[in-house]
Image (cartoon, rainbow, N blue to C red):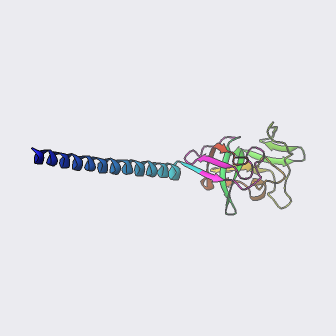
Amino acid sequence: MKNETELSNKNNNIVQETSVAQDIVQLLLKIAFIVLAVFLIFTFLYGIVRINDVSMKPAIKDGDLVMYYRLDKRFISGDVAVFEDDGRTTTGRVVAVAGDTVDITKNGLKINGAEQISQDIYYDTTQFKDGVDFPVTVGNGQVFILGDNRPQASDSRIYGCIDIKDVKGKVIAIIRSRGI
């Protein structure tokens, strides 16, 4: 009787150890699957980038994290886009799309002959001396982007219209990193 009890206890311990090992393997597989899913989502659908630029201040400040959606390349005026500028990633506001004519005069920004007034832009829109000659017509597959901090922004006034294929995506969230 004693041998049967000892054998039963040994079998129970072996079954419990196997069960614990299986639980750990299943947990590790679940964690690996979740990590892989997050990696794939942020590789192909979304992106996160730290902005080290004052072009969009005060909407996006130097040091903020920006989350953007990679797949939607249909921009309208007012969208904020993430794009590459001389090897660094930055943001800017789309002010004109394909077919629009952009002109910057002493009176400010004009799109298709209509003067643009925005409550969120605190600075006058002026031309840069070494920039693009205005008026400019935005071509198919292009956008015209300006920073909200117009005097210090590096934007389409300098290098012209941006091809949509060079735009990384559309900003969907801003995560403030200052003061945290």
* Residue 22 point in image, percent of width and height: 29, 49
Q: Nearer the viewer, residue 114 or 143?
A: 143
Residue 15 vs residue 179, the one in the foreground:
15
Q: Magenta includes 53?
A: yes
* Residue 133 among those drawn in magenta: no
Residue 8 location in percent, x, y? Answer: 16, 45
Where is residue 89? Give x, y as percent.
67, 57
Q: Which residues are magenta?
A: 48-77
Residue with the most extreme bottom position: 87
Quadrant location of the N terminus in the rendered image: top left
Residue that sits furthest to the front in the current view: 2
Check the image and report above or below for 130 versus 82: below
Image side of residue 87 versus residue 154, left or right: left
44 left or right, relative to 145: left
- Residue occupying the point 61% across, 47% down: 67
Point 38% across, 51% down: residue: 28
Left or right of 70 on screen, residue 175: right
Residue 87 visible at all: yes
Picture coordinates of residue 55, whole percent (x, y): 77, 52
In the rendered structure, the answer to whether residue 85 lies left or right of residue 121 reads left
Residue at point 63%, 53% (across, down): 49
Q: Can I make out residue 99 in this image?
A: no
Q: Which secondary structure type mostly characterizes the magenta part of the structure?
A: loop
